[in-house]
Image: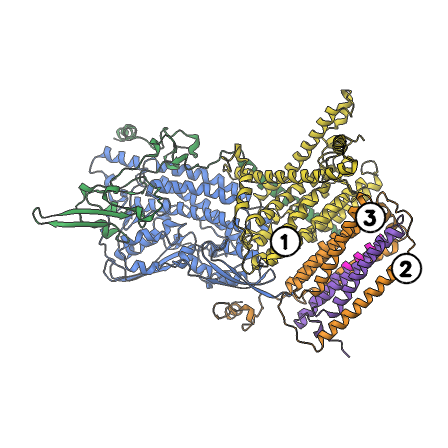
Chain colours: A purple, B green, C blue, D orange, E yellow
């Protein structure tokens, strides 16, 4: 059951990503968790593309889009983190409460 | 648009100029690759120390009158002169003389001021030992003569720039027996004798 | 991909005392913001040997071998100033021939110093090859020094009232050879370095010092001349016989590292020119000629006169520094090298204050490097041309 | 099971284990630098998984973009912001973590259950495509042209946005810079000293 | 196109002759070329270090290594021996795991790139479809290793060096990829073999360097920057950062850095040869010669001759690049970090894009000459 194997790996990765996303105090680690989740999605896409759509490979195309968006996300996300860091002098997520209420 | 194109043109010109000058520089380094290396490969080739070279000090026991001028002109009063006044002949008798070459800076003051020329500079410069105390030369050690570079069969002697013939720059290209720049006294006498005669 | 420029944590970085480009044992404590220099603090004293105090416990004769350890790359100048100071105080006259020999030696020493500066400066920017080329030429100068003085660096050649020995046989010819050989070599360096776009980009407009600023900071030498001040002690103080030679003060107006580079390179050419003139004008000509003239003209000839001696009177080991005080300076390759000498009619000077050019020129460094990049510190420091031996003394 | 399949199965197990372990490291290791380096490990092992899925181009792209760019960027950011800071204690953080872990494990179980119970419409035989490149290229320039162009615009916007966000607001004029004398990071480690402020500001 | 000699099949046949099954023979075969290429690459990189010493010595009017073997050719071996027996120091406050892992990652990533470098028609480990893209991708792992060693050394010089290395290699990967992309555009494939084959028809005239002069220059500059060679050797700038990220390294770990930097240079040389100088092709088409003499292309001795000529040509071209790089290293000063980034982003990147655009335009306009 290779397809299932890939999917389970992806699911595990996704869950780890969610865990990191929620529990991390460090903003950079939050970004890394998001990357993990995106990668989990990518594994799914490629697995489906390989096992269900092997002649068309539409999943791979999607994976490329996901990768490009992830790159953009990382760049912008890090820029945001850094500019917050610059103004608040911390990367603690608990302190990022400018928009509360 | 035109301005932009101009800018692009300037940029291109600058790039070409840069390439040209870097190429010019590489030409210089490349040109050096065909020149003869100037390396003097030390243990196999040695430069002949100049006549005035201030190497290890040579000391002649018999000439010394224990006047201690060498001690007084030495920057650190280094020479150790051990003498005893002999009442019979009313002269100082030298008992021992030593210089520690681990401390000596070879300034040559002692040689310059020695009234009896008991001290002289040799051409020995490789004074390396495993124990620095071995560098403390007593009068016996000071009296030894160094081996000459030119007489060492394992060494190719090379002359320093000032001793090369007129016009020669590189010692490798010149045999060490060739005449150096400057005329011999008799030649000058001959030449300037003529000049002098003409003047008269 | 984006390069994110951020306000990074300031980083205090310690350059030296053992750092490849610190020219000896200078230590710079640099505060960096990323690659930008926020602050720079030189720390001196790692090569302090108490040179001034040593001078107070030595006769001038005894002290002379020490002085080449101040600025060990422009050795003749330190000797010149050490003998000039008591000479002026005691009013000792110097024979013309000795003065010419001194000038030749000084200018050779200046070339040697500038050559080494060129090598290290370009090496500080990252080009290693010119370093080897300048050593080739410098070795020749040192060969000449060795033939005349007996040592390559620690000459102990100048004496109160002249020099220790006359020029040896054939020396004048070979020195001429060298000067004729040097100029094409300098052309070669310039081909290699001057127009190199990377070199230009790196140092053009870098470390600019304005005219007023340079004067206010007490800079001297090429640092000052590159900032548009035409100030050369050889012209101003009229010491030795520089007035008899035909030469120009080399200067520039832009005040940046490139200007300093050009000033020094031009000074090398000018020095070569001066040496050639001095060799021609040397009273009595080369040593072999002088001797021949003396033999020919007999014992009472003018060739035995005072102007054709290499030393007026050999200084006695108990030469006393007369009472009095004054300040004597020479134009060393790095700038104004001065000695403030106080004598009290004793064999030891009472005070022997050294004014090293490198020490004074170094002061401006923190101001120049602030706001620059890390790599610029080395370029600017290289262009200042310091020798820690004279900075720390 | 022939040789090729055996190798594949073994690689799958190894790569999955690496991926999961490294990912756990990313979220659990307190030292952020370690997590960032482990993230690189995750990316590389995932690209290995991609190779097993016959996606060589995506695998290379994964390495190029994730490892070569995203991860380096993250590392860069971490090293620039490398400040040891002690977070303030937050109430019930342990409870939070345990709850989150439980929820995540539950989610994983759910997903795993779904994955295993779903009857997948597997293609009978996986056609070995001569070159995935060609197919992807064709897709990108025919039916996915619009998303492709949009992605390029997105990247451009992200580029501009990131630069604007991260750029300094103003470049401090070196002449007028006032260096706060009291600032800790500027003072020497050895001894307190006068800042050179007075001289520099009065000079200019 | 002829296929040339097929070493793999030949060896498998031999092994099967010993009574092994085909599967086992293939398994036995698999590590062989990798090992071979690894060894060859190491030796060639060592030759680079020797060449560096000799060329720099000659350019500086020195002699260089002389007494170790003829012309000092054994100096690299002596180097390796020395570095291996040197004490491996890990600074007390360094991070031992990352400190060890850093050079290993750099080394692996460089040597992995040799996977797709062809020394001849069939003389490469694998002709994967992604070819040149794979090289660019894998070589982008190296900065991680540099950052790792820079960070873990717990030394400020090393940290700055690591950051510089990462910034530099990120910046110059893009122009490098753009220049390679223009080539790919002409050869209609990412595979290194197809890129060379596309330059095969008219000998020296069909080499890409004539069709892509701008791309060639961009590639040269970015390759130098990727290799951290002198005008761009900021990460290990001696005068500024002592030795950058390698400051704290000794012994074997330093050897890994040193070796991989030269292997990287060699890789760049090989890439230049493959992408722009016609790879293993001779300056004149060798097939014509075989036609003139009426030799069948499948004659074994002729195949051996062409294969060895091909290897020689590839190496000659690579070493030509390396020689130029060495000479350049000993000629020019180092650029500053902002100038480096300016050159990458404000000069090479736009020029590379324009070059790509021009190539595409030419490809449409003159399909015969630009691989239609």
Q: Position of residue D169 (x, y in %)?
A: 68, 67
> Percent position (x, y) of residue B47?
38, 36
Q: In the image, is B150 to the left or to the right of C220?
A: left
Query: What's the magenta bit mostly, secondary-structure-wise?
Result: helix
Q: Quadrant of the C terminus of chain C?
A: bottom left
Q: Quadrant of residue B200?
A: top left
Q: Are marks 1 and 2 in contact (CB under 8 Å)?
A: no
As helix, strand or loop, the secondary structure at mark 1 comes to helix
Q: Residue at x 33, y 48 (%)?
A: B132
Report the mark closest to the observer, 3 or 2: 2
Q: Is residue A44 above or below residue C198?
A: below
Magenta stretch containing residue C141, yes or no? Answer: no
- In the image: residue E288, left or right of residue B85: right
In magenta, the rendered stretch is A60-71
- The subunit letter for the residue under badge 3 reads D
- Which quadrant of the rendered structure holds the N terminus of chain C? bottom right
Label 1 neighbourhood size at 10 Å, few (<14), some (14-19), many (20+)?
A: some
Discs 1 and 2 lie in a common subunit: no
Identify the residue position indicated by label 3 in the image. D54
Q: Nearer the viewer, mark 1 or mark 2?
A: 2
- For numbered disc 3, what is the local secondary structure? loop
Q: Could you tell me which chain the residue with mark 1 belongs to?
A: E
Circle 3 packing at 10 Å, graded few (<14), some (14-19), many (20+), is many
The residue pinned by badge 2 equals: D118
For the residues labelled 3 and 2, the Cα–Cα distance comes to 23 Å
């Amino acid at each position: 059951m290779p397809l299932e194997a890939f999917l389970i790996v992806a699911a595990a990765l996704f869950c780890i990503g969610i865990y990191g996303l929620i529990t991390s105090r460090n903003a950079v680690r939050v970004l890394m968790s998001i990357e993990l989740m995106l990668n989990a999605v990518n594994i799914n896409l490629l697995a489906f593309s390989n096992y269900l759509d092997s002649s068309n490979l539409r999943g791979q195309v999607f994976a490329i889009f996901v990768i490009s968006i992830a790159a953009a996300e990382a760049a912008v996300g890090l820029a945001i983190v850094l500019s917050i860091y610059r103004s608040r002098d911390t990367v603690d997520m608990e302190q990022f409460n400018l928009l509360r209420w | 648009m035109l301005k932009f194109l101009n800018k692009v043109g300037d940029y291109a010109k600058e790039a070409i100029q840069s390439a040209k000058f870097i190429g010019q520089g590489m030409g210089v380094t490349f040109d050096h690759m065909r020149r003869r290396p100037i390396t003097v490969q030390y243990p196999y080739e040695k430069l002949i120390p100049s006549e005035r070279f201030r190497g290890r000090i040579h000391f002649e026991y018999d000439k010394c009158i224990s006047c201690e001028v060498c001690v007084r002109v030495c920057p650190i009063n280094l020479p150790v002169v051990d003498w005893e006044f002999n009442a019979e002949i009313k002269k100082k008798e030298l008992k021992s003389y030593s210089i520690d070459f681990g401390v000596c800076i070879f300034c040559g003051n002692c040689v310059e001021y020695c009234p009896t020329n008991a001290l002289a500079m040799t051409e020995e410069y490789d004074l390396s030992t495993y124990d620095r105390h071995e560098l403390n030369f007593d009068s016996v050690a000071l009296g030894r003569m160094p081996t000459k570079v030119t007489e060492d069969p394992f060494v190719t002697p090379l002359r320093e720039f000032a001793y090369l013939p007129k016009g020669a720059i590189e010692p490798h290209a010149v045999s060490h027996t060739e005449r150096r720049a400057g005329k011999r006294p008799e030649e000058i006498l001959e030449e300037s004798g003529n000049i002098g005669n003409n003047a008269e | 991909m984006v390069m994110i420029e951020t306000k990074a944590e300031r980083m205090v970085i310690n350059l030296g005392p053992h750092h490849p480009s610190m020219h000896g044992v200078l230590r710079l404590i640099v505060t960096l913001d990323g690659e930008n220099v926020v602050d720079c603090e030189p720390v001196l004293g790692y090569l302090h040997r108490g040179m001034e105090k040593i001078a107070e416990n030595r006769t001038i004769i005894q002290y002379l071998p020490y002085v080449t350890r101040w600025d060990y790359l422009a050795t003749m100048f330190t000797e010149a100033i050490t003998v000039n100071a008591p000479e002026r105080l005691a009013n000792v006259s110097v024979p013309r021939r000795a003065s010419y020999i001194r000038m030749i030696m000084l200018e050779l020493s200046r070339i040697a110093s500038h050559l080494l500066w060129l090598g290290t400066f370009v090496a500080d920017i990252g080009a290693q090859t010119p370093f080897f080329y300048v050593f080739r030429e410098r070795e020749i100068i040192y060969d000449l020094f060795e033939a005349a003085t007996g040592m390559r660096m620690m000459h102990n050649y100048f004496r109160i009232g002249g020099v220790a020995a006359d020029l040896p046989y054939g020396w004048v010819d070979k020195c001429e050879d060298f000067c004729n050989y040097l100029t094409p070599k300098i052309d070669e360096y310039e081909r290699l370095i001057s127009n190199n776009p990377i070199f230009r980009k790196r140092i053009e407009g870098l470390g600019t010092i304005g005219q007023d600023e340079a004067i206010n900071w007490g800079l001297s030498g090429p640092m000052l001349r590159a900032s548009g001040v035409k100030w050369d002690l050889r012209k101003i103080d009229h010491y030795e016989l520089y007035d008899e030679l035909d030469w120009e003060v080399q200067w520039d107006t832009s005040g940046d590292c490139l200007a300093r580079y050009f000033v020094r390179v031009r000074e090398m050419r000018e020095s070569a020119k001066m040496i050639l003139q001095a060799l021609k004008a040397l009273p009595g000509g080369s040593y072999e000629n002088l001797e021949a003239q003396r033999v020919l003209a007999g014992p009472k000839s003018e060739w035995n006169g005072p102007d054709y001696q290499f030393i007026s009177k050999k200084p006695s080991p108990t030469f006393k520094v007369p009472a009095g005080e004054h300040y004597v300076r020479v134009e060393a390759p790095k700038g104004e090298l001065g000695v403030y000498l106080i004598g009290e009619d004793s064999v030891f000077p009472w005070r022997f204050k050294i004014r090293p050019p490198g020490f004074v020129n170094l002061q401006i460094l923190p101001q120049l490097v602030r706001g620059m990049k890390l790599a610029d510190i080395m370029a600017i420091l290289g262009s200042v041309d310091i020798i820690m031996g004279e900075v720390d003394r | 099971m022939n040789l090729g399949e055996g190798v594949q199965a073994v690689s799958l197990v190894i790569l999955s284990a690496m991926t999961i372990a490294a990912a756990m490291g990313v979220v659990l290791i307190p030292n952020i630098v370690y997590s960032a380096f482990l993230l690189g490990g995750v990316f590389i092992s995932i690209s290995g998984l991609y190779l097993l899925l016959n996606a060589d181009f995506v695998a290379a792209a994964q390495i190029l973009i994730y490892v070569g760019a995203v991860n380096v960027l993250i590392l860069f950011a971490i090293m620039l912001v490398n400040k040891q800071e002690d977070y303030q204690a937050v109430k019930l953080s342990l409870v939070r973590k345990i709850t989150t872990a439980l929820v995540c494990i539950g989610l994983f179980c759910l997903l795993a259950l779904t994955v295993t119970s779903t009857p997948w419409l597997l293609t009978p035989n996986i056609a070995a495509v001569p070159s995935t490149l060609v197919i992807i290229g064709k897709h990108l320039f025919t039916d996915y042209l619009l998303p492709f162009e949009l992605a390029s615009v997105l990247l451009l916007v992200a580029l501009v946005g990131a630069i604007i966000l991260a750029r300094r607001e103003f470049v401090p004029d070196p002449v007028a810079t006032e260096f706060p004398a009291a600032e800790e990071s500027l003072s020497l480690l050895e001894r307190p000293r006068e800042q050179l402020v007075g001289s520099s500001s009065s000079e200019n | 196109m002829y296929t040339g000699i097929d070493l793999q099949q030949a060896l498998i046949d031999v092994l099967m002759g010993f009574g092994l099954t085909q599967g086992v023979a293939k398994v036995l075969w698999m590590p062989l070329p990798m090992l071979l290429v690894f060894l060859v690459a190491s030796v060639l990189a060592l030759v680079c270090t020797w060449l560096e010493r000799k060329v720099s010595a000659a350019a500086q009017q020195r002699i260089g290594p002389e007494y170790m073997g003829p012309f000092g050719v054994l100096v690299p071996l002596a180097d390796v021996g020395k570095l291996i027996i040197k004490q491996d120091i890990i600074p007390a406050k360094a991070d031992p795991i990352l400190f060890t892992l850093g050079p290993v990652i750099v080394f692996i990533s460089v040597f992995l790139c040799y996977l797709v470098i062809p020394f001849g028609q069939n003389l490469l480990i694998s002709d994967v479809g992604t070819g040149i893209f794979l090289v660019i991708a894998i070589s982008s792992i190296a900065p991680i290793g540099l950052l790792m060693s820079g960070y873990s050394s717990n030394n400020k010089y090393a940290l700055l060096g690591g950051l510089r290395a990462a910034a530099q290699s990120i910046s110059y990967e893009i122009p490098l990829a753009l220049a390679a992309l223009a080539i790919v555009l002409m050869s209609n494939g990412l595979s290194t073999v197809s890129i060379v084959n596309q330059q095969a028809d008219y000998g020296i005239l069909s080499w890409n360097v004539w069709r892509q002069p701008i791309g060639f220059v961009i590639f040269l500059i970015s390759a130098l920057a990727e290799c951290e060679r002198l005008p761009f050797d900021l990460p290990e700038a001696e005068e500024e950062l002592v030795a950058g990220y390698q400051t704290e390294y000794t012994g074997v770990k330093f050897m890994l850095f040193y070796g991989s930097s030269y292997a990287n240079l060699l890789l760049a040389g090989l890439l230049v040869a493959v992408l722009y100088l016609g790879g293993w092709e001779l300056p004149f088409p060798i097939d014509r010669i075989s036609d003139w003499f009426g030799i069948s292309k499948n004659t074994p001795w002729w195949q051996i001759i062409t294969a060895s000529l091909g290897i020689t040509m590839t190496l000659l071209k690579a070493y030509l690049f390396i020689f130029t790089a060495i000479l350049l290293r000993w000629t020019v000063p180092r650029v500053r970090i902002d100038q480096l980034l300016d050159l990458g982003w404000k000069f090479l990147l736009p020029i590379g894009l324009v070059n790509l655009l021009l190539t595409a335009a030419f490809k449409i306009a003159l399909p015969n000459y630009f691989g239609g």
